Image: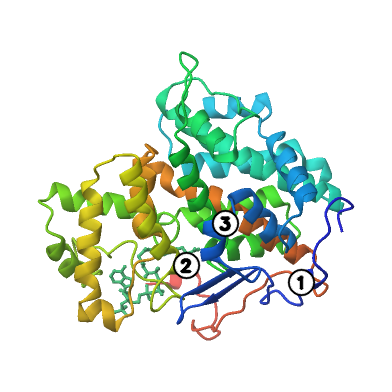
Amino acid sequence: STGYITFDPGYVSTGSCQSDITFLDGEKGILLYRGIPIEQLAEKSNFIETAFLLIYGHLPNRSELDYFQYHITHHSMVHESIKKLYDGFPNNPHPMAVCSAVVGALATFYQDQFNNQTAREIEITIHRLLAKLPTIAAYSYKKSLGQPFLYPQNHLSYTKNFLNMMFATPCEPYEVNPVAAKALDVLLMLHADHEQNCSTSTVRLVGSSRCNLYSSVSAGIYALWGPLHGGANQAVVEMLQKIQDEGGDAKKFVEKAKKPNEEGSSRLFGFGHRVYKNFDPRSKIIKQMAHEVLDKLKVQEPLLDIALQLEEIALKDDYFISKKLYPNVDFYSGIIYKALRIPVNMFPVMFAIGRLPGWIAHWVELQGDKDFRIGRPRQIYQGKTSHDYVPLEQRG
Ligand code: SDX
């Protein structure tokens, strides 16, 4: 117990490869957060409540939720010195580079608490990270525009606060569209955890050295950035835009994507998954959301039509069928982010904001593991057998 919020008794995992947090069934397309189907959470819950569920192992009661929400709201500002970091970046850095650097820099502000952290200190760190990442992210966008940073507003919800910091200016208030705020909240929920994916495994491995949570999350952001992982949502929209710019021939692109290692070709980004071999349950929800959100926001998005064509062609193609490649979480999410006016290079940042509760939950689970051990993967050595050193003058 942290003395403030109790963790579930089954909470302490029994080994670094075992976890109580998220269950995936790749064949059946099942995704459960602490045993609750993602479809029910997407329909009935919200991101902050889902973050609590993932981190503490149970749905919060009213007082737990109010406590959690209050402390996240009241940690959303960053130290004024943090803003000076942005002055050191070039004008238009990729926001994933900024977010990982600034999250890592948070460790310099709280470094006195890292050895033998109390549960209370860990809890405050959890609040700080969940609260500050949207602020740090919005500031990276404002930096790229050369616009002033806006302070978080405590009266706004989590996603309205983020969208306000992104799009308001000191010259005029910004009316956040509730449809946009709700869509973003559901997208963050759908990205909140996904078992031992690349970035979460990175957070666990870094955390397994007893490294602090800020630095572990910073490492996770870097891992997520790759186009094979969380960077895929940006790569999908850039791919769709390229297809549109080249005449909109989805079939030609699918044919090229079947030879992904050939010169001038590229994978069908947003397709395929290491675990899901029939469908990604998140992609089904996001595809439906894309139609609804664009309709409600009255946004005409030709890239959605191209995405639908790509999916229809690929799902009937023997190459994709034989390799069990289906749309994943990244295939349609960018269509919604684009409709919310979020710039394409910020799409992976949205994934990071969504995945943060999962990273935190896994790091905390690891710290509480009664069989805690540092992560130390082994290898199958295929190098040269032992042989003597050859002096330079005797080398060819
Ligand atoms: C995420 O792990 C997670 O849970 C990740 C994630 C999460 O929530 O954390 O779900 C989020 O990262 C989703 C994936 C986003 N990435 C992309 O959309 C990039 C495109 N997809 C691929 O690069 C690939 O499908 C992966 C990386 C997602 C999965 O990689 P695998 O399972 O290791 O598959 P692979 O790369 O070994 O490919 C298997 C075969 C290969 O052909 P062969 O070498 O056997 O001949 O399928 C081909 C690949 O060339 N292939 C593709 C393809 N994906 C795989 N060919 C064309 N287009 C594709 N998208």
Q: Is residue 89 visible?
A: no
Cβ atoms under marks 1 and 3 closer than 8 Å? no
Q: Distance from label 1 to label 2 (Cα)?
A: 43 Å
Q: Quadrant of the N terminus?
A: bottom right
Q: Which residue in the structure is indicated by mark 1?
A: 373
Left or right of residue 230, residue 37 in this image: right
Amino acid type at image mark 2 = Leu
Q: Which residue is under mark 3? A: 44
Task: Work out whether residue 322 or residue 393 is closer to the camera in this orientation and state it.
Answer: 322
Mark 3 vs ligand 1: CB below 8 Å: no
217 relative to 186 in the view: left or right: right
- For disc 1, does the CB lie below 8 Å from ligand 1? no
The mark nearer the N terminus, 1 or 3, is: 3
Q: Are marks 2 and 3 in contact (CB under 8 Å)?
A: no
| Disc 1 versus disc 3: nearer the observer | 3
Q: Quadrant of the C terminus?
A: bottom left
Residue type, mark 1 in image = Arg
Q: Residue at x 83, y 44 (%)?
A: 113
| Disc 2 target residue | 392
Q: Residues within 10 Å of mark 1 (few under 14, many from 20)?
A: some
Q: Position of residue 378 (x, y in %)?
A: 61, 79
Q: Which mark is residue 235?
A: none
Q: Amino acid at mark 3?
A: Lys
Q: Nearer the viewer's eye, disc 1 or disc 2?
A: 1
Specify the quadrant of the image occupied by residue 331.
bottom left
Disc 3 secondary structure class: helix
Counting residues from the N terminus, which is met first, the one under dot 1 or under dot 2?
A: 1
> In this picture, is 380 found above or below 302?
below
Crowdedness of circle 2 by 10 Å Cα count: few (<14), some, many (20+)?
A: few
Marks 1 & 2, CB-CB < 8 Å contact: no
